[in-house]
Image: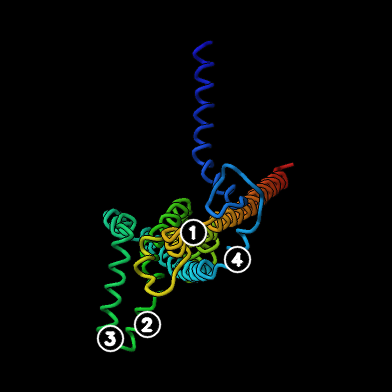
Amino acid sequence: MTSDLIQKYMVRFYIAMFFLYLFGPLILMGTTAFNTPKFPTAIPFKEGTLEWFTVLANDKTILEGLQNSLLVGLGVICLSVPIGLAAALLMSQVHRKVQPIYYTIVVSPLLTPGVIIGISTLVFWDKVGTIQGQDYEAFYYNPYFLTIVGQSTFVSAYCMLIFLSRLQRFDRTLEEAALDLGATNVQVFKKIMLPFLKPAIGSAAVLAFLTSFENYNTTVFTMTEGKTLTTALASKARLGTDPSLSALAVVIVGITLVGVTFHEIYRRREVRKDELAAEAAKRAAHLADKAMAPV
């Protein structure tokens, strides 16, 4: 057996082990959702059942946590995406010597432990409400407000990084040309910048929602009343789990796969549309050159 053949088999073995490590737990967990024992068991597989999906649908704690997570996620999108966009635009406007300092300050929440962010958010807004009086204290101590603000502290930094990567490919001459032709800054932003940033806005919104949806370290301190899905799952797991949690995981994985599939279809259609537009532009330019060529 040659060394090349051995290397080939070793690479295949490594790839197989990697995917087994990556998807093995998901496969086992998915199997427990369709097994009959009350404790999550994949082996031996006794009998197929959909009972645990019914149990999940009747679990008020999980459903309430899911609803709260969706509300918080939408709030985080509405707050984090504009803040991240503003931070990225400001990054492109400040002086080169100031950019490293500004970047370090804006990205610092990503390096801060979620526990610290959660505690500091709770303490800070509690003090702000105490200073402004009882009328404001009830608002600032609202669990949804605290959770959205606390999560947006670091989620907005993720959004900023997405916008920065997109802005690196932006042609500044378009902006300068529009201003020279009499457009206002608002018109340039609406007509040129926003259409260019449309893919980044969608990506930032998806990332903000997913990061908020799965967050636990910050949420466990800021959600003073009620539960999100992650905190509800943690409490349920501590008290004793059953295959309904596996059923929830199967549902989430299924929704994720469907979402990824539709996103990939949409992305390929957009790429194809851009390719067709580029080909049409080349043909038009070629015809124009032929028309202007001397006979």
Do the residues under discs 2 and 1 have CB atoms within 8 angstroms? no
Q: Nearer the viewer, residue 275 or 154?
A: 154
**First in sequence: mark 3 vs mark 4:** 4
Q: Which residue is mark 2?
A: 139
Q: Which residue is mark 3?
A: 132
Left or right: 239 as drawn, with respect to 259 = left
Do the residues under discs 4 and 1 have CB atoms within 8 angstroms? no
Determine whether the residue tagged by mark 3 lies in a helix, strand or loop.
helix
Q: Position of residue 293 (x, y in %)?
A: 70, 43
* Number of the front mark, 3 or 4: 4
The three-letter amino acid code for the residue at tag 4 is Ala
The three-letter amino acid code for the residue at tag 3 is Gln
Q: Quadrant of residue 219?
A: bottom left
Q: Quadrant of residue 163?
A: bottom left
Please report the residue visible at 54 percent of the width from the left and 31 percent of the height from the top.
Answer: 16
Q: Position of residue 181 (x, y in %)?
A: 51, 66
Please report the residue visible at 52 percent of the width from the left and 27 percent of the height from the top.
Answer: 13
Please report the residue visible at 33 percent of the width from the left and 60 percent of the height from the top.
Answer: 114
Q: Nearer the viewer, residue 220 or 241?
A: 241
